[in-house]
Image (cartoon, helix red, strand yellow):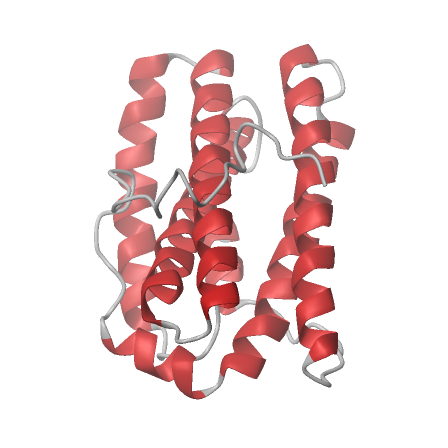
């Protein structure tokens, strides 16, 4: 499988450190919650990758006149679908079935923060996507450092690197299509709200 620039070889790229975008780390107890029910983590992770691809294409459909957005997010959608298949293959190998998506309170909470109209709504969509990728990166890196299975450790280290690249992609697009000073001010607001949202949610074996 070809590897994109945001999806580097784990043998030369360890999991990234904490993202400066996040205002609070995940509760350390989450790692043990996830380790205790890795099957559920894998199922949730598959849904996350599937929805990430769908969200990228939703942005393309809504903003087809933004040339750089279309180019970069169509590529991202392909990568997210590739990751979905990788996670899906691993859960099937464990004798699991994916089942229906029960919904994601974390993503739903972020969507309630979105501005209602453009141009502010596009900025919020891109910044919330960056925050989701940053939180995913953090938790996948935590898994990479905590699992006993060397294959899963390498797998999650590689995907953590990919999520870090996706975070940068969304931040770059936000700064491209809005005033950078306004973007930074809004990012601070949304990142603060994201940290409060994470703190309010129960610790579950989920990526978010």
Image point (36%, 56%), residue name: 141
Measured along the vertical axis of the image, is residue 112 above or below residue 63? below
Image point (28%, 42%), residue name: 19
Examine the rendering and report whether any part of residue 114 can be seen.
no
Image point (39%, 73%), residue name: 147
Residue 149 or 28: which is nearer the viewer?
149
Quarter where residue 93 is shown: bottom right
Measured along the vertical axis of the image, is residue 142 above or below residue 116? below
Is 83 on the left or on the right of 141, as rendered? right
What is the x, y in percent for residue 92? 74, 76
Residue 2 or 170: which is nearer the viewer?
2
In which quadrant of the rendered image does the C terminus lie? Answer: bottom left
Quarter where residue 89 is shown: bottom right
In which quadrant of the rendered image does the N terminus lie? Answer: top right
Measured along the vertical axis of the image, is residue 192 above or below residue 208? above
What is the x, y in percent for residue 2? 69, 35
What is the x, y in percent for residue 94? 67, 82
What is the x, y in percent for residue 112? 49, 53
Residue 17 or 44: which is nearer the viewer?
17
Image point (33%, 34%), residue name: 187
Is 142 on the left or on the right of 94, as rendered? left
Examine the rendering and report whether any part of residue 153 can be seen.
yes
Is 176 on the left or on the right of 141, as rendered? right
Give the tally of numbered discs.
0
Residue 71 or 200: which is nearer the viewer?
71
């Amino acid at each position: 499988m070809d590897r994109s620039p945001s999806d580097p070889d784990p043998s030369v790229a360890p999991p990234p450190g904490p993202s400066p975008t996040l205002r609070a780390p995940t509760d350390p107890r989450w790692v043990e919650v996830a380790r205790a029910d890795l099957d559920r983590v894998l199922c949730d992770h598959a849904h996350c990758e599937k929805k990430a691809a769908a969200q990228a294409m939703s942005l393309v459909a809504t903003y087809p006149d933004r040339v750089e957005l279309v180019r970069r997010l169509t590529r991202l959608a392909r990568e997210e679908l590739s990751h979905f298949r990788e996670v899906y293959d691993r859960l099937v190998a464990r004798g699991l079935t994916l089942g229906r998506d029960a919904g994601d309170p974390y993503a739903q909470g972020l969507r309630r923060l979105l501005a209602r109209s453009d141009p502010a709504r596009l900025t919020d969509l891109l910044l919330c996507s960056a925050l989701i990728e940053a939180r995913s990166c953090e938790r996948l890196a935590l898994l990479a450092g905590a699992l006993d299975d060397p294959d899963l450790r390498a797998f999650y280290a590689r995907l953590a690197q990919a999520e870090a690249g996706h975070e940068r992609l969304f931040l770059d697009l936000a700064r491209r299509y809005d005033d950078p000073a306004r973007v930074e001010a809004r990012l601070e607001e949304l990142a603060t709200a994201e940290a409060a949202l994470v703190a309010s949610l129960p610790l579950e074996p989920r990526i978010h």
